[in-house]
Image (cartoon, helix red, strand yellow):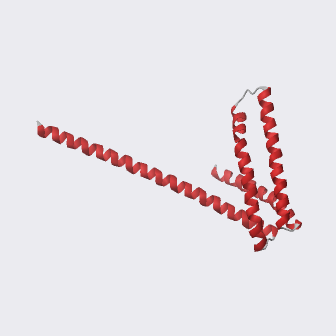
Amino acid sequence: MKNKFQIKSRKMNIIIFKKLSIITLFSFTISFIQAQEKSSIKEQKDARESRKIAFFTSKMQLSSEEAKNFWPIVTEMETEIKELKSKNSKIRTISSQKDDISDKELEKIMDTRMEMGRKQMDIKLKYYEKFKEVLPIQKVAKYYQATSEFKKLQAKSSHHNNRNRK
């Protein structure tokens, strides 16, 4: 009797061990895949940022000294704008999730959007002044022209990538 119980117990332990081993292996595999995806996303973002800097530096014909002074200011501006947008992303989410919004709620949402636009313009004006401190006005103008051109290229590239996924 004791032998049969020990054999059954041993078999159960082996089955449990196998199941735990499979679960552990599966967990490690998922963790590894997620880490790779994050790494891949970061690499893509870094590559996109490098292409952007190369594009603007070329279009603006920046010297290495000008680029060294200019790019930290651009990064600062982009960070400020990104923070402003993330603060207001909740409003966009709320308005897109509701089908039936009262006039009062809609007015509040629209007022917030207008205020965000004003704050964004204030940030851009502040950095326009900073750009003029480190670059000649001709190159500052080229930055804004290149910005428009770069956005068009991104839109075209995004459209092209979306067509290829279908």
From this viewpoint, which residue is outermost toward the right? 137
Residue 120 is left or right of residue 27, and the answer is right
Q: Position of residue 47 (x, y in %)?
A: 65, 63
Residue pictured at 74% horizontal, 69% vertical = 68
Q: Left or right: where does residue 9 sit relative to residue 124?
A: left
At x 74%, y 47%, the residue is 84
The answer to whether 32 is drawn above or below residue 119 in the figure is: below
Camera-side residue of 101 and 105:
105
Q: Quadrant of the N terminus?
A: top left
Looking at the picture, tell me which residue is in the foreground, 87 or 142.
87
Q: Position of residue 154 (x, y in %)?
A: 74, 56
Q: What residue is shown at x 33% (from left), y 44% (from top)?
A: 19
Displayed quadrant of residue 9 = top left
Query: In this orientation, which residue lies closer to the viewer: 61 or 159?
Result: 61
Which quadrant of the structure image shows residue 101?
Answer: top right
Which x, y percent locates residue 74? Answer: 76, 60
Q: Quadrant of residue 58?
A: bottom right
Residue at 80% over, 52% down: 123
Residue 144 percent location from the top left of the image:
84, 59
Q: How many marks?
A: 0
Residue 36 sits above or below residue 6 on the image: below
* 123 versus 135 height, above or below: above
